[in-house]
């Protein structure tokens, strides 16, 4: 079976848009590589910072992603770019809650990009369905929030912390270390009662260009760890390093190249800014690669 026919699933303990009832809860299933649309409600995100501060602008962007065929929308209220300044839980919630409430009322599938248990709990209560945590639920309170709500989590690998992570990333074997970390986190989180997980190698999070390329080349292995793999290369600095594109907003062609590679190697989803462009390219690539 080719990548475009491969089925992926996340399980929830509550009904979410597009899910089916199963004996243990609800399952969201999709075929091929889904697209998670990025919606940052921040002044300082490296690519779309400041664009969605008005509620109307945020909702219009999310609806356009949904209409293009996004699997889910990833709402974030705190930038994790290298050197980002942390924000309080109260400020993060002020930014994201109105957006989550409005999108949930419109039936969109919503993930929330946060590192804070307090934010995750309030976001799930406001109608979000999944938590995307770049610290992989290492905070026991985060695990508890997801387990209590019956919400899945995206677990991302990061070496160090956002403020300093790009200073001197070092690994003996980046693919083995990231793979082992993701497996260990998945076991821990599932044992705590979280219903299902996405795994994410965390491109650019405490990684040099060579580390990122090694991980991308190993997408097929990382996609075989027993959980759907999420890959996020959208507009990241590695594209500037590889192709000389200093302005993040101009990096969609490079993002597409990296994400098509990831999709063809079995990634279950890609986290992207340019949702319509990605769906167009994925559909064309799927047609070429379809077997039988
Ligand atoms: N990358 C960013 C943020 N969250 N989550 C996952 N699971 N994987 C990623 O690769 C990832 C992530 C950074 O990108 P962005 O949200 O565009 O920028 P910022 O952190 O500056 O808001």
Image (tube, rainbow, N blue to C red):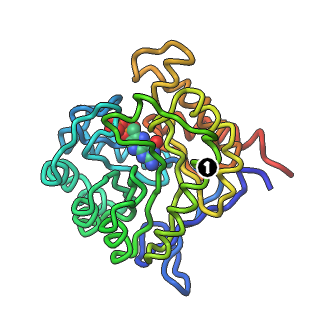
Classify the position of the N terminus by image quarter. bottom right
Left or right for 19, reference 174: left
Q: Position of residue 225 (x, y in %)?
A: 65, 59
Residue 253 higher or lower than 270, as above or below: above
The picture quadrant where one finds residue 130 is bottom left
Judge by depth and name the residue closer to the eye, 17 or 209: 209
Q: Residue furthest front?
A: 172
Between 222 and 277, the one nearer to me in the picture = 222
Q: Tell which of 21 and 75 is nearer to you.
A: 75
Under circle 1, the secondary element is loop
Relative placement, left or right, of 189 versus 285 is left
Q: Which residue is disc 1 drawn over?
A: 33
Q: Position of residue 49 (x, y in %)?
A: 27, 32
Residue 76: percent from left, percent from top: 30, 47
User: Can the viewer see residue 65 in this picture?
Assistant: no
Q: Is residue 47 above or below residue 68?
A: above
From this viewpoint, is residue 119 visible? Answer: yes
Q: Residue furthest top?
A: 244
**Quarter of the displayed picture in which ligand 1 can be seen:** top left
Q: Quadrant of residue 152?
A: bottom left
Q: Is 73 located above or below residue 127 in the figure?
A: above
Residue at x-position 26% and y-position 43%: 78
In the displayed image of the protein, which residue is found farthest to the bottom? 23
Decide: is 172 above or below 153: above
Count neighbours of disc 1 (C-alpha within 10 A) and say few if under 14, some if 14 to 19, many if 20 or more: many
Looking at the image, how many numbered discs can be counted on the residues?
1
């Amino acid at each position: 079976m080719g990548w475009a026919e491969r089925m992926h699933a996340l399980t929830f303990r509550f009904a979410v848009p597009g899910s089916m009832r199963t004996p243990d809860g609800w399952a969201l299933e999709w075929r091929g590589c889904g697209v998670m649309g990025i919606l940052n409600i921040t002044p300082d995100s490296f690519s779309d910072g400041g664009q969605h501060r008005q509620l109307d602008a945020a909702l219009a962007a999310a609806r356009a992603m949904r209409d293009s065929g996004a699997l889910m929308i990833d709402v974030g209220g705190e930038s994790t770019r290298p050197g980002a300044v942390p924000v309080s839980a109260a400020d993060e919630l002020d930014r994201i809650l109105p957006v989550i409430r409005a999108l949930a009322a419109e039936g969109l599938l919503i993930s929330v990009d946060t590192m804070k248990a307090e934010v995750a709990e309030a976001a799930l209560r406001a109608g979000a369905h999944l938590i995307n945590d770049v610290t992989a639920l290492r905070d026991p309170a985060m695990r508890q929030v997801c387990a209590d709500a019956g919400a899945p989590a995206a677990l991302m690998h990061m070496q160090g912390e956002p403020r300093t992570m790009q200073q001197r990333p070092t690994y003996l074997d980046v693919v083995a270390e990231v793979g082992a970390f993701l497996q260990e986190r998945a076991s821990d989180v599932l044992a705590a009662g979280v219903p299902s997980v996405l795994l994410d190698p965390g491109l650019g999070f405490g990684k040099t260009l060579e580390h990122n390329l090694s991980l991308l080349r190993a997408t097929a292995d990382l996609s075989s760890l027993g959980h759907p793999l999420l890959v996020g290369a959208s507009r990241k600095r590695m594209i500037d390093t590889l192709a000389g594109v200093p302005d993040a907003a101009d990096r969609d062609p490079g993002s597409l190249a990296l994400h098509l590679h990831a999709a063809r190697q079995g990634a279950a989803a890609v986290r992207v800014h340019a949702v319509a462009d990605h769906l167009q390219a994925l559909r064309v690539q799927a047609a070429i690669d379809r077997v039988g």
